[in-house]
Amino acid sequence: MITLDEAKNYLRVGYEEDDGLILSLLDTAKQLVMDVGRIDENGLELHKDITRTATLTALGYLYENRSNPDYQRLTLSLRSILFAVREGKI
């Protein structure tokens, strides 16, 4: 869905030292989007514009707050982005 290069561009990271961390956080962000959106891999593809935005939002939050993340705050943000997907309105 989102490549390492796309993720690094979104995060404005131009070095390779954090590549492993970014890939790990990208997997976590994707799983969070699936969990909060109540969707599977097919749902990610079906609603790719929304889920891509949600995944990048989660990735950015996790990367910037990696030492002290507030998962409740992140979950509420993802719920807002994924509301229509969660409620089956689209």
Image (cartoon, rainbow, N blue to C red):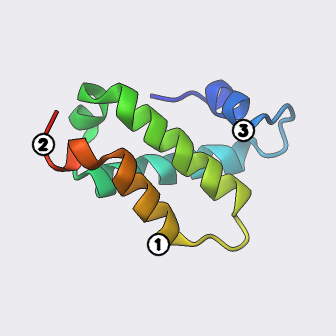
Q: Label 2: which residue?
A: 88
Q: Quadrant of the N terminus?
A: top left
Q: Position of residue 67 (x, y in %)?
A: 73, 70
Q: Quadrant of the C terminus?
A: top left
Q: Position of residue 59 (x, y in %)?
A: 58, 47
Q: Is residue 8 visible?
A: yes
Q: Position of residue 24 (x, y in %)?
A: 59, 51
Determine the CA span between mark 2 and mark 1.
23 Å
Q: Residues within 10 Å of mark 1 (few under 14, many from 20)?
A: few
- Which disc is residue 11 wearing? 3
Q: Mark 3 or mark 2, which has the lower sequence index?
A: 3
Task: Describe the element under mark 2 as helix, strand or loop.
Answer: loop
Determine the CA span between mark 3 and mark 2.
30 Å
Q: Position of residue 7 (x, y in %)?
A: 64, 33
- The image shows residue 88, relative to residue 75, as above or below, that is above
Q: Residues within 10 Å of mark 2 (few under 14, many from 20)?
A: few
Q: Label 1: which residue?
A: 72
Which quadrant would residue 79 be assigned to in this image?
bottom left
Residue at point 67%, 32% (across, down): 10
Task: Describe the element under mark 3 as helix, strand or loop.
Answer: helix
Residue at point 23%, 42% (across, down): 84
Q: Amino acid at mark 1?
A: Gln
Q: Nearer the viewer, residue 65 or 27?
A: 65
